[in-house]
Image (tube, grey):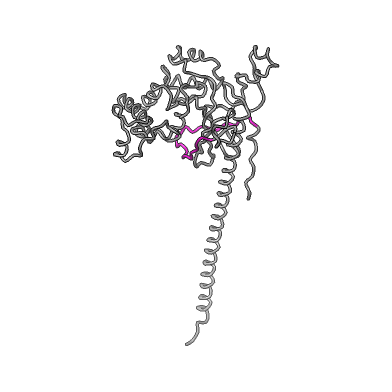
């Protein structure tokens, strides 16, 4: 058998060379794609690690500020600046004068305002006094939350009864309510027979999950608290909570928020000037933050929101040894998806130097 010779042989060799070049090109392309993907995954992991480190640093920094700085009507101070009244100036040598409540102007607001933390992390701090204490607040305020959400009056009455039956220790039914047997029959976990431990526990109360269908978990956290808070801080209450006050509609609630953003309210009578009349529940309204609240932390890159409920324990008497005498402690923590609303807040910078630098994560 004679071998291939001449032009046919050279053509065959050329085809083989071209085929090998194509294979090599495909192999090189595959290697490049794989290398790029591995590199991108490594960069993404490094960014996630850096975000986790910055989030922990931001939370620790806020804990430091909450325990070392005083609060004013406007929020949490970030340095030793102080503004005094004339009477306080007259007592400038007195130790009590360092606790003036007058705003300085550079406070971190405690009304859920979004701020830039360390690195790509944003944070918001919410004073519990600005929220509705679901275990303690006026039933009328809670009813107005559902009224504004479009829940019918009859259903609002039933919701209040069911919340009471969920919390009380007996098995006696209130009207249109349910106890342990009703929960089990409906395939639900039985009631806890105690005050709610977290706001998200409201979803376990019969009927409340349906009534709160328009609320995502962050909206519940931004509306309700389980702290002993029978009052509302007008300087830190979000719009949904302000609208529960008698005579306050969305427009007037927006007006209150706009005015307190410029200058915190210093006297509750200012509310009457804004609304034209004082709400009948004015004796239950405050202007100064309490010692408990919520911190929310999230990355500008997206992902989840870390929610921490904090309590200052500067006067901890040691009766709760698990706190180990800490100046503050975390009562509960959630990791929740970020809200997908179009009106996401833009994080503003703080004037606090402690948020200036990010510690690089190990490579």
Identify the residue at the far front of this view.
319
Residue 117 forms part of the magenta stretch: no
Image x and y of residue 158, in percent: 32, 27
In this rendering, the answer to whether 232 lies above or below 302 is above
Drawn side of residue 203 relative to residue 233, left or right: left
Q: Quadrant of residue 178?
A: top left
Q: Magenta stretch: give its range.
A: 330-352
Q: Nearer the viewer, residue 356 or 158?
A: 158
Image x and y of residue 327, in percent: 60, 32
Taking the spot 53% from the left edge, 42% from the top edge, the residue there is: 301
In this rendering, the answer to whether 117 lies above or below 37 is above
Drawn side of residue 333 relative to residue 190, left or right: right
Identify the residue at the far bottom of this view.
1
Image x and y of residue 47, in percent: 57, 46
In this rendering, the answer to whether 336 lies above or below 284 is below
Image x and y of residue 349, in percent: 60, 31
The prevailing secondary structure element of the residues shown in magenta is loop
Residue 341 forms part of the magenta stretch: yes
Q: Nearer the viewer, residue 73 or 344?
A: 73
In this rendering, the answer to whether 10 lies above or below 146 is below
Identify the residue at the far right of this view.
93
Count of marks overlaid on the render = 0
């Amino acid at each position: 058998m004679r071998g291939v010779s001449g032009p046919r042989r050279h053509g065959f060799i050329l085809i083989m060379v071209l085929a090998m070049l194509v294979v090599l090109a495909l192999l090189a392309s595959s290697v490049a794609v794989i290398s790029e993907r591995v590199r991108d995954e490594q960069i993404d992991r490094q960014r996630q690690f850096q975000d986790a480190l910055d989030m922990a640093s931001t939370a620790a920094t806020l804990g430091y500020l909450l325990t070392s700085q005083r609060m004013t009507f406007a929020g949490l101070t970030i340095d030793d600046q102080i503004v005094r009244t004339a009477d306080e100036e007259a007592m400038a040598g007195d130790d009590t004068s360092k606790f003036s409540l007058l705003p300085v102007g550079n406070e971190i607001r405690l009304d859920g305002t979004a701020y830039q933390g360390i690195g790509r992390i944003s944070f918001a701090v919410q004073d519990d006094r600005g929220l509705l204490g679901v275990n303690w607040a006026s039933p009328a305020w809670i009813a107005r939350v559902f009224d504004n959400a479009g829940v019918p009056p009859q259903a609002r009455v039933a919701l209040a009864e069911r919340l009471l039956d969920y919390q009380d220790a007996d098995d006696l039914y209130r009207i249109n309510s349910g106890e342990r047997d009703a929960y089990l029959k409906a395939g639900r976990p039985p009631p806890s027979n105690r005050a709610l431990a977290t706001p998200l526990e409201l979803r376990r109360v019969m009927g409340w999950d349906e009534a709160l269908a328009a609320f995502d978990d962050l909206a519940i956290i931004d509306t309700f608290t389980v702290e002993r808070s029978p009052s509302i801080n007008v300087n830190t209450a979000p719009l949904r909570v302000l609208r529960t006050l008698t005579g306050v509609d969305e427009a007037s609630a927006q007006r209150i928020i706009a005015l307190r953003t410029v200058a915190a309210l210093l006297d509750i009578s200012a509310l009457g000037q804004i609304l034209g009349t004082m709400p009948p529940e004015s004796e239950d309204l405050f202007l100064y933050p309490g010692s408990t609240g919520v911190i929310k932390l999230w990355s500008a890159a997206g992902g989840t929101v870390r929610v921490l409920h904090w309590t200052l324990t500067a006067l901890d008497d040691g009766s709760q040894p698990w706190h180990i005498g800490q100046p503050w402690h975390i009562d509960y923590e959630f990791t929740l998806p970020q809200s997908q609303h179009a009106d996401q807040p833009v994080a503003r910078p703080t004037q606090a130097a402690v948020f200036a630098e990010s510690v690089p994560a190990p490579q």
